[in-house]
Amino acid sequence: MATDRLGELLENVVPDPRGPGVVVGLVGPDGSLETAARGMAVLEHDVPIADDTVFHLASLSKQFTAEAVQVLVREGAVGVDDPIADYLPWMPFKEVSVDQLIRHRSGLRDQWELVEAAGGRMEDVITTADLIELIRRQTALQDEPGARYAYSNTNYTLLGLLIETVTGERLDTFCRKQFFEPLGMDDTRFVDNHRAVVRRRASSYQRIADGYERIVLSYGTAGATSLHSTVTDLARWAAAVSSRESWRGTTYTGSDSYGWGVHIGEHAGHLKLWHAGADAGFRTHLAMVPGIGSAVVLGNFAELDPDPLADRVLGLIEPGRAEQLAGTYYCDELTAVVRVVLDEGGLALERPRYGRRTMTPAGERRFTVRTDDAESPEIALTFDQAGVELGYSTEGVRGLVFRRFEA
């Protein structure tokens, strides 16, 4: 369901609705989904982005690979402390374990940086066989296994190969049976063939001086990347798995930790499990706040920063905040009143003679309100922790304070 409060978030993020763009989704604690989209999925054919547009997810794919490994661990087919070489005998580093791969503590060099160091270009066709050859030829690790967190795509390519070796199935086939089909994720698949036809797939772009240009992506590998999906399918995934304790695992927890294919952090005092992705012009983010809701961001232009946009979407679902902050506020300096009111599940600012304007989340207890004034196009609002004082600033007027007024 498309909503105005999400749509307003995208107007500044995607200033050109005829260029590439983004779709966002807000998943409620009950699994309900609100969406908004702005921009084009395929510029060459004027195809707009929609809820069923399929995006290459880049590194957001890793949590699906990790969950597939968890299935094998629960079945007893794989041990988390097993050396990966037990399953992939060609692996040159016999001491690296499955758990170390999952948590990016293997010490292995990153595969994409190895490709570039070898003179390859990221727009070249890069297959799993190419990556295996690069990994197989390595003679040294960057760190002792387990010693340090260092994000490396190599880890999840190896995990994808582990899954295929143990199950005898392609990664996509295994995940389809385990997750995609049971959850009704009909538009989700790992694409390990760069020639594959994917219906409704967005293309990727970047801005140039006189418009846009395509960024070619020809990956023939899956595990660390190459999952394709839609905002609707990812909402189903988030609703089904976000509250699983197993996402975090039992060690390395903390504000900057990495669990089973997800970063572990906080949002407004709540546990947040998240991952972003960036390949070619695709920019993606899935943030899950267990018991509260999730945010999905899928874009197809390289200049998009999906992380703050996901936080702004999450700001719309923090429990009880809207009700707590709604009220009437009075400023002594102006002898004026403003009202903060509930509006379609979010908040809006009412000012005399200016009417009602939607308040867009901009961080912890911070909001922005768009105006019609070209010189001061935005009002910045900040609530104190007690919800008693409301800071009010524009380009020309800073530091005004309105205090909650009880008639």
Image (cartoon, rainbow, N blue to C red):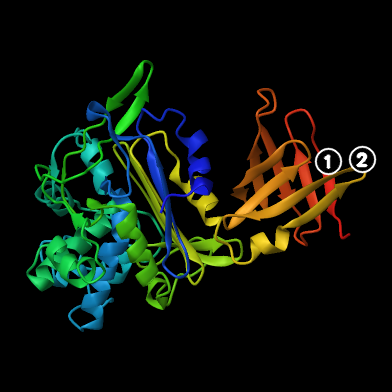
The crowding category of the residue bearing disc 2, from other C-alpha atoms within 10 Å (few below 14, some 14 to 19, many at least 20), is: few
Which image quarter is the N terminus in? bottom left
- Viewer-side residue, 119 vs 46: 46
Q: The residue under label 1 is which amino acid type?
A: Leu
* Helix, strand or loop at mark 2: loop
Number of labels in the image equals: 2
* Helix, strand or loop at mark 1: strand
Residue 38, position as x, y percentages in the image:
40, 38
In the depicted structure, whether residue 261 falls above or below residue 285 = below
- Viewer-side residue, 208 vs 342: 342
Asked if residue 4 can be seen in this view, the reply is yes
In the depicted structure, whether residue 278 falls above or below residue 302 = below
- Viewer-side residue, 76 vs 339: 339
Mark 2 in CB contact with mark 1 (< 8 angstroms): yes
Residue 189, position as x, y percentages in the image:
19, 56
Question: Disc 2 to disc 1, how far (Cα)?
Answer: 8 Å
Left or right: residue 37 compared with residue 325: left
Residue plotted at (26% across, 31% down): 215
Furthest residue toward top: 210
**Which residue lies under the disc numbered 1?**
400
- Viewer-side residue, 190 vs 82: 190
Residue 342, position as x, y percentages in the image:
65, 56
Furthest residue toward left: 168
Residue plotted at (28% across, 63% down): 64
Q: Quadrant of residue 47?
A: top left
Compare marks 2 and 1 and give the one earlier in the sequence.
2
Left or right: residue 22 compared with residue 53: right
Q: The residue under label 2 is which amino acid type?
A: Glu
Asked if residue 97 can be seen in this view, the reply is no
Label placed on residue 333: 2
In the depicted structure, whether residue 200 falls above or below residue 157 = above
Which image quarter is the C terminus in? bottom right
